Image (cartoon, grey):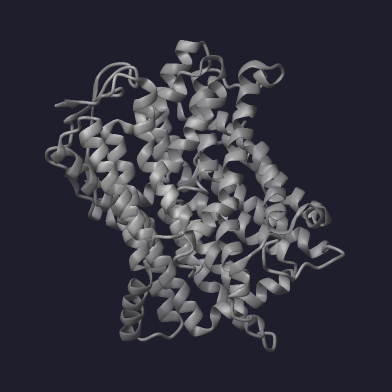
């Protein structure tokens, strides 16, 4: 048994700085644009191993086993989702159905701003609520590229849009993880998150369009942005507080899509915005090939066929995300492989946990219930319906592996880095630094959730990492543990747009390989500002009447 050490240098400031090195080093390499992102990920992983062993006294063999576990969890489920989404997308492009779908979206509205609301926000929220784990950015990024958006716009705006739905993503998985790590009621936690995020659900459509086209262009479509935000936010609040947190994401997305589509029947802006480039200097737009002419309008039967793969995908992922389907599929094959030499041999100690507790370290290979497997099933069904031969399906899949191979390496290396920092206690050292903020803890505790997602790429993982710390610290400070545990999840969603794996997913989906630094620079300020706004809102809920009335009581 090895117990984690949270202040290995006997100096809190120095230990915190060293703990931050792997993440800062990774982001700096990506932002520099001078090194390929998969190489940056591998180099940063090596640095993390050295710091875990030499700095935080983790045994070398344990560090290697934690790294191996992270590499596996990087490919399953994250990389598995990306591989199969891109496979489905490439099939629809090859058949010509994607171009028809692109045309049909243009028929709904030719305005690029309204297309963003419908695809990046509402459609992306549905995929987040159904499956999460990179699916929404992969799908919406690919669709926006097909619609003619520049690579930077498609990638960056998909990342910004994929925020407010994240805390209830994958049928409430982050709330389940938060409840498990804190011992608090998931219904109460979901209700509290549902009293924080709806405010930002209303803001995000306006923020998204402002980031794309500027404030003046945003004012021109404020009725559509308001309908989008209000329908999603109100449904998110109502479902999370009066039904359950598991349906809050997908239910709010469905309500939003239906209301937004209906609104477009009766309203269009006076000025149609046709530019698909960002309002800022967008080098990616200048390097794009000119969009292909749409040609004659496809008949309704062809449009229905073009949407069929994506409708099948929605249905399959909706089914795949239910507990009943997961249990059924896991009944066929879901072996658990404890990592020998690591499982139950790393011990978290106070003040991160109430009492010393060993960390489980096992890889569960629930292959059939992975969302990526559901996407693969969708792709195969769609390919057969599109008339592809079995031989061509196999060769197309091999070609897709070649396209995304570096992205898969990058994602696995980044998950390995996040897993290693967890077992080495590096994440806890950073968390304790935030926890020392005293009366300002509601603000900095929220940013702790942001940091957790930026490090791990997952709101669920951030909740598992820091949920217990949030409860312990809030109780010591006389704050509501439900408020601060929920704040970890709500603040975390704003870190989703800058976590390295999401950026790689976005670059892969848009085919803009090697430009991850440009994407990071575009979304970084948005992420920090939005996280701070969530922190200020949680601070109001903690101390200021009448916001304190919104705090859910146990």
Q: Report the label total.
A: 0
Q: Residue at x 31, y 79 (%)?
A: 394
Residue 475 place in picture, x, y as percent = 46, 13
| Quadrant that contains the N terminus | top left
Q: Which residue is at 62% across, 61% downward? A: 119
| Residue 458 position in % (x across, y down) | 42, 44
| Residue that sits furthest to the bottom in the current view | 296
**Is 32 positioned to the left or the right of 348 in the image?**
right
* 195 up-or-down from 116: above or below: above
Q: Residue at x 26, y 52 (%)?
A: 71
Q: Is residue 162 left or right of residue 256?
A: left
> Relative to 432, is 146 on the left or the right?
right
Q: Do we see residue 317 in this rendering?
A: no
The residue located at (37%, 39%) in the rendering is 21
Residue 476, relative to residue 316: is it above or below? Answer: above
Q: Nearer the viewer, residue 412 or 359?
A: 412
Asked if 513 appears above or below 472 in the picture, the reply is below
Q: Residue furthest right?
A: 270
Q: Is residue 102 visible?
A: yes
- In the rendered structure, the answer to whether residue 387 lies left or right of residue 286 reads left
Measured from the top left, where is residue 478 in percent x and y? 51, 10
Quarter-wise, where is residue 548 in the image?
top right
Task: State the image quarter where residue 91 is shown.
Answer: bottom left
Residues 533 and 42: in front is 42
- Place of residue 175 in the rendered image (x, y in percent of width and height, measured from the top left): 46, 35
């Amino acid at each position: 048994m090895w117990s984690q050490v949270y202040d290995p240098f006997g100096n809190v400031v120095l230990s915190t700085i060293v703990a931050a090195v792997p993440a800062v080093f990774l982001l700096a390499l990506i932002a520099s644009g001078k090194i390929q992102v998969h190489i940056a990920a591998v180099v940063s992983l090596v640095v993390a191993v050295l710091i875990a062993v030499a700095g935080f006294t983790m045994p070398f063999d344990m560090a290697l086993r934690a790294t191996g576990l992270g590499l596996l969890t990087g490919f399953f489920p994250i990389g598995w989702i990306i591989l199969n989404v891109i496979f489905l997308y490439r099939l629809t492009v090859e058949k010509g159905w994607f171009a028809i779908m692109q045309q049909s979206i243009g028929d709904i509205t030719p305005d690029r701003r309204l297309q963003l609301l419908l695809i990046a926000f509402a459609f992306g929220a549905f995929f987040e609520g159904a499956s999460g784990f990179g699916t929404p950015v992969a799908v919406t990024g690919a669709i926006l590229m097909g619609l003619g958006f520049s690579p930077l716009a498609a990638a960056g705006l998909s990342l910004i849009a994929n925020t407010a739905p994240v805390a209830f993503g994958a049928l409430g998985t982050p709330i389940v993880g938060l409840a498990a790590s804190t011992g608090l009621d998931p219904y109460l936690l979901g209700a509290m998150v549902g009293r924080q995020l709806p405010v930002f659900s209303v803001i995000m459509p306006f923020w998204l369009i402002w980031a794309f086209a500027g404030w003046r262009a945003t004012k021109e479509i404020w009725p559509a942005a308001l309908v989008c935000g209000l329908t999603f936010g109100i449904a998110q609040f109502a479902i999370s507080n009066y039904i359950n947190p598991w349906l809050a994401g997908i239910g709010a997305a469905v309500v939003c899509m239906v209301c937004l589509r209906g609104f477009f029947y009766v309203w269009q802006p006076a000025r149609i915005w046709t530019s698909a480039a960002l309002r800022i200097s967008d080098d990616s737009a200048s390097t794009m090939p000119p969009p292909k002419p749409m040609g004659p309008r496809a008949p309704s039967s062809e449009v229905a066929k073009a949407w069929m793969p994506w409708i099948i995908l929605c249905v399959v992922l909706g089914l795949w995300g239910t507990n009943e389907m997961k249990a059924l599929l896991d009944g066929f094959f879901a072996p658990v492989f404890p990592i020998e030499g690591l499982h139950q041999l790393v011990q978290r100690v106070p003040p991160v946990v109430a009492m010393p507790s060993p960390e489980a370290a096992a890889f569960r290979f629930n292959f059939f219930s992975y969302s990526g497997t559901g996407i693969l099933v969708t792709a195969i069904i769609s390919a057969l319906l599109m008339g592809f031969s079995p031989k061509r399906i196999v060769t197309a899949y091999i070609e897709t592996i070649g396209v995304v191979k570096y992205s898969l390496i990058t994602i696995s290396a980044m998950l390995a880095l996040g897993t290693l920092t967890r077992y080495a206690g590096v994440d806890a050292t950073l968390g304790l630094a935030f926890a020392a903020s005293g009366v300002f803890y509601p603000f900095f505790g929220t940013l702790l959730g942001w940091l957790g997602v930026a490090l791990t790429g997952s709101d669920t993982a951030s909740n598992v990492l820091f949920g217990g710390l949030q409860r312990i610290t809030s109780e010591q400070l006389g704050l509501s543990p439900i408020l601060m545990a929920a704040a970890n999840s709500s603040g975390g969603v704003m870190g989703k747009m800058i976590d390295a794996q999401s950026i790689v997913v976005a670059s892969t989906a848009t085919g803009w390989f090697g430009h991850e630094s440009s994407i990071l620079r575009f979304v970084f300020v948005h992420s920090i500002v939005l996280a701070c706004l969530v922190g200020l809102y949680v601070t109001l809920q903690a101390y200021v009447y009448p916001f304190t009335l919104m705090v859910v009581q146990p």
